[in-house]
Image (tube, rainbow, N blue to C red):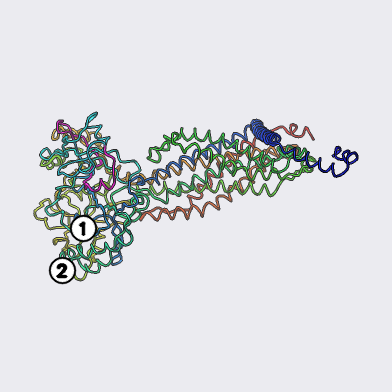
Amino acid sequence: MELYKEMIKTSGKRKADFNFVIDVLLLFRPGIIGRGNKEYSINSYAMLKNYFKIGWRSMLRQRMYSFIKIGGFAIGIAACLLITLFIREELSYDTRYQNGDRIFRVVVAYNFNGESGKDVWFQAPFAKALKDDYPEIEKVGRYNSSELFGAGSAQIRRDDQPDNTYEEGFVYADQALLEILQVPMVYGSLAHCLDNPKTIVITKRKADKFFPNENPVGKLMIVNNNEKEPYRIGGVIENLPPASHLQYDFFLTMTGVEFWKGEQSDWGATNYPTYIQLREGSDKSQLEKKMIGVINKYLLPRWIKDGVPNADVLAKSAWFILQPVKDIYLKSEGISDPVSHGDIRFVWLFGAIAAFILLIACINFINLSTAKSANRAKEVGLRKTVGSNRSSIINQFLTESLLFSFISFGLGLMLAELLMPFFNSLAAKSLFIPWKEWWFIPIVVASSVIIGILAGIYPSFYLSSFKPIQVLKGNLSKGSKNSFTRSTLVVFQFTTSIVLIIATAVIYRQVNFILNTKVGFDKDQVLVLRGTSTLGNQVKTFKDELQQLASVKGVTVSDYLPIKGTKRNGNGFWIEGKQNEDHSLGVQFWRVDPDYIKTMGMKIVDGRNFSPDAVSDSASIIINQTMARKLGLKDPVGKRVQNWRAWNVVGVVEDFNFESLRNEVGPLCMVLGESPGIVSVKLNAQSLTAALPAIESLWKKIAPHQPIRYSFLDESFARMYDDVKRMGRIFTSFAVLAIIVACLGLFALSSFMVEQRGKEISIRLVLGASLQNIFSILTVNFLKLIVVSIFIAGPIAWYMMNQWLLDFNYRTKITWDVFAITGGMAILIALFTISYQAIRAALAKPVNNLRSE
């Protein structure tokens, strides 16, 4: 500008203006622009480096608070990661099938005469009828997993070896089922592996066990000691993935199989879950409506022929549902089927627990950052005084938050890796951290950035809001609003933790209730020997010799037991002569021997037990109280009931639970008949130790090449509730983690409060305050917050656990003592957490705090 003024004086204004414009244009040089960007970049890098340096130094200056921030964060991240992996596994079930969007399981639903239900059991010819009558269906496959016909578990061996081994996972299956599921083949052809009679397909793990280092296709295997009819291996498939609702290792062909004469054309018995694959472009909803034709064309004529009461009304009360294969594992509530399930409600519940634990850790970070604001206030004031604007200060504190987040994520990942074996044992899973997956590290980095920013937003805006003049004069407000925010967050932390503790207590109380409630039979000291059908004609000899042992009180031979994993057989029953008046009642139809009721400790409440002379009771039937009630039989003894034949009711047995206590007792009846797959032995409690060697010795004498397999009835009964116990253990673990994280925050806040009120405490001590007075002053406010948390958590936990208990027909009550004990525990834990700081402050020398006054 000085040159411009000189130019006006010497050369005139016009020339000066021209030269000025030229000089300005010459300033726009690429070099200047480039240097400007470079300098800006250098300054930004330097500023970011400075932010991290300041954050690191601040972390080292306040080691205890930094440890609590990072430790709590790391625990929250580890818990969140473990549960996320669990949820990922649960949601991945049956999602890897080729053409999975066109694969469905057929479900029949009914609502008849006040009774409703859903199941997947269909007649043998049902699959062929679907394939023949509906062109929309490309493939139909079925399987039979019923132990009634030899599936489930069996003895098996190579044909060139004498000794059998027991194996689980046997199933009869169609060739089409393997084609629908598109299971990869290791050896053999998928298209024809089960085409021929007496063929078997095994998984790779079983091939490696029985035929190591060789191709077993074409080799023979003996199933259940039946050497006359060996199975030829038609193929080896890859192991079914863990995330599959079907978990079998031995697929026995259905080709040429009939479980009784004419079974494959029999529209009476229902034993087959059935799967279909639709053709591309087919309408699932329209097909569901059209499939009603199966009932009218095939089932209704059979029901009328069998004399099923009100068969035409029953036909109009049923319909079909095509359930996507990916929904079977998590979304089969209320459907009767033979496979194990997860529960979508528990998946989301565990997800909420993970989120809450991580939120508790974030709350610790927020609370401690704002609580220690006075220590950073002068730094903020000085920065603003020398020219820093609010955005740069916000950036600084957000950078520090990111630093904490990165360190916490690193420690959290290491902690999750260490806890993984323990968590797998809790959840009965085989989870692992997917380090090698390309997406894992980017997600971890992105998550650490997002969580770091979210956790740091409030403290950053709060700390950057300080006024420089007030701060530097020492007039920083104590911040009642901020104190209220911290109190609210503490209440949230402990409310969440107390809800988890109450939930854990209720779960364990329900498990204890189940295991100790009266179930209508004596499950103690009953030894269950499985696979005894392979003894053939020697089963009776085995039973007779068992009864001679001094340690044995009773023996019964029957595959039907009141626990899961044993035979079931449903039949329709009605009162004889009332086909046109009554509706048929679905009843469990069990074949037992004369000693069954006595050995199982069941009680006859009317009539008599079966006679040892089986011939005289060949047409006799014993029913339970529920069957008598639902058939309307007030005096059932002497009455006649009918299914495919007529039976004389000779006795009524007291209701006993033969399924999970989640369900009410259903109608059941017993008749005399052969069912030799299981021998149950009632033992003397005083001679249990001597009984087992004696029984094993007797078994080896009768079946030297067959392994003995046994369990105790009470243990099998308890295993029916492993999912509930597993849920309880998971809740316990994460409740402990939540309490630890919450207590870390409470410990740090109590330390901060002692530091903030140090001079006040010293003055009180000088004026004669006792240790108890000081302890009370420092703890009462925190205990008030815990009490508030208890009153908030109580109704939430009560509602949540009452909803969970509705799954059980037999359930415990949630009584006041659960809340009282949990509340007391929460107060004691909180008191223990803050007592160290309170006692330390009360015992401190007043002169140390008052020296500066």
Choose the circle earlier in sequence order: 1 or 2: 1
Where disc 1 sits, the SS reads: helix
Residue sitting at x 91%, y 40%: 9
Name the outermost residue toward the top: 213
* Quadrant housing residue 580: bottom left
Q: Residues within 10 Å of mark 2 (few under 14, many from 20)?
A: few
Residue situated in front as seen by the camera: 256 or 60: 256
Indicate left or right for 584 with 422 as reference: left
Q: Pointer 2: what residue?
A: 577
Q: Quadrant of the C terminus?
A: top right
Q: Is residue 686 above or below residue 671?
A: above
Q: Position of residue 2 (x, y in %)?
A: 86, 38
Amino acid on which the number 2 mark rests in the picture:
Gly
Q: Is residue 197 above or below residue 573?
A: above
Residue situated in front as seen by the camera: 528 or 66: 66
Q: Residues within 10 Å of mark 1 (few under 14, many from 20)?
A: few
Q: Is residue 172 magenta?
A: yes
* Quadrant housing residue 155: top left
**Nearer the observer, disc 1 or disc 2?**
1
Q: Position of residue 647 (x, y in %)?
A: 14, 60
Residue 338: tell me if it is visible.
Answer: yes
Indicate left or right for 683 with 767 as reference: left
Residue sitting at x 45%, y 42%: 83
Where disc 2 sits, the SS reads: loop
The magenta span reads: 157-185
Q: Position of residue 528 (x, y in %)?
A: 23, 42
Q: Is residue 422 magenta?
A: no
Amino acid on which the number 1 mark rests in the picture:
Asp
Name the outermost residue toward the bottom: 581
Q: Pointer 1: what residue?
A: 132
